[in-house]
Amino acid sequence: MDLLTLLLFLAGIALLIVGAEGLVRGAGHLAVAIGISPLVVGLTVVAFGTSSPELAVSVASSFGGQPDLAIGNVVGSSIFNILVILGLASLVAPLVVHQQLVRFEVPLMIAVSALVLLFALNGVIGRIEGLLLFAGVIAYTAWAIIKSRRETREVQAEYEAEIDGRPVNARTVALDVVLVVGGLGMLVLGSDWFTDGAVEIAEFFGVSELVIGLTIVAAGTSMPEVATSVVAAVRGERDIAVGNAVGSNIFNLLAVLGATALVSPGGIPVADAAIRFDIPVMLAVAAAALPIFFTGYVITRANGLFLLACYAAYTAYLLLDASDHDAVGPYSRVMLGFVLPIVAVTILVLAARFHLRRRSESPAPD
């Protein structure tokens, strides 16, 4: 691996981040200009835009003959979004979780994660399965638009503040068109550089493309979501901070994975390692999020530290396993036999306490 490869890899990350920002800003303002509400724009255009790096990289990887990067990118981003993005955002400020999120979006995220695992069991996510996933994101988007009409004024105000209005004239419309076209161009070029660099890095360190996809590539393509959620938490826009991470997971699994499978000849091959470990971890992370979310409907700083610690433990396992380190066996036994059972019991106890407290606070029937 030479210096030019590393520079192109870093430049690819920068182009993906800047391109996604340009696409989100330009498309968001154009949508508002033609009369679409800021809340609907936030739930659709912004959600698609922040997931555009994952889409660009996954499609480029699949066409380039690196399906492990494509799968690793989507699965790794889904794990990263919950454990790291929500962890970091909750350290900035405790995050209040909207009850609708717990009632629908998080169960949907769990169901879609389980569906992806089911589709992957035969070793390939085919075009028919990709079509089903992509049809799911169309249905989800339609539902989000309908649901937005019933949101509280407080939630609507958050999205209006995030998607700032500007005067609509020929100059601003032209600027937004330039942002959209320029953003798309940056995404295409950035995905090529980023993918080529990731393959070189994997070869240099002697690790699989799947591991690189699950770690470096997933973190790089998730930078727009990191920026959106952390900045939203700083501004006190907590519905956006939480909804962005969960919504991005749903879009990644339905839109990114679905579209990549649709356009890939023969679908996307899925490595045995991903089927046996990484996709089940993604499902477990999604399932573990539910009791954390409804325990008081607040993600505290302590919860955030716990989420970050889980990601550190997962990444440590990937690196130990990739290097065939002697410690991987003892590490796995400690995690599976001691740490994970304690975590599971703690989450269940917190969930039970919250349920009992809610029952005691509810008024008795007449």
Image (spheres, rainbow, N blue to C red):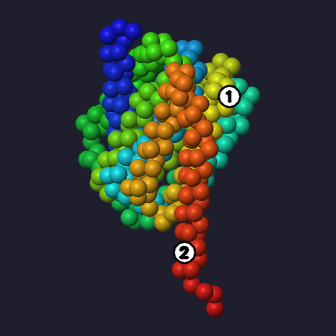
Which residue is farthest bottom? 366
Kindly state the secondary structure of the residue where label 1 is placed: strand
Between 166 and 229, the residue placed more toward the observer is: 229
Kindly state the secondary structure of the residue where label 2 is placed: helix
Camera-near label (1 vs 2) is 2
Type of amino acid at the residue the image marks with label 1: Ile
Say which quarter of the image contains residue 15. Answer: top left
Say which quarter of the image contains residue 45. Answer: top left
Say which quarter of the image contains residue 346. Answer: bottom right
| Distance CA(mark 1)–CA(mark 2) | 43 Å
Which residue is farthest right? 122
x, y (%) of residue 104? 58, 56
- Residue 37 visible in the current orientation: no
Between 58 and 33, the residue placed more toward the observer is: 58
Between 329 and 284, the residue placed more toward the observer is: 329
Instruction: Report the quarter where the N terminus lies.
Output: top left
Few, some or many residues within 10 Å of mark 2 (<14, 14–19, 20+): few
Between 126 and 218, the residue placed more toward the observer is: 218
- Residue 22 visible in the current orientation: yes
Q: Is residue 223 left or right of residue 349?
A: left
x, y (%) of residue 31? 40, 44
x, y (%) of residue 298? 44, 61
Q: Are marks 1 and 2 in contact (CB under 8 Å)?
A: no
In the picture shown, does residue 57 fall above or below 107? above
State the residue position of label 1: 125
Give the mark nearest the N terminus, 1 or 2: 1
What numbered label is drawn on residue 357? 2
The residue drawn where x is 40% and y is 65% is 153
The residue drawn where x is 33% and y is 56% is 93
x, y (%) of residue 7? 32, 16
Few, some or many residues within 10 Å of mark 1 (<14, 14–19, 20+): many
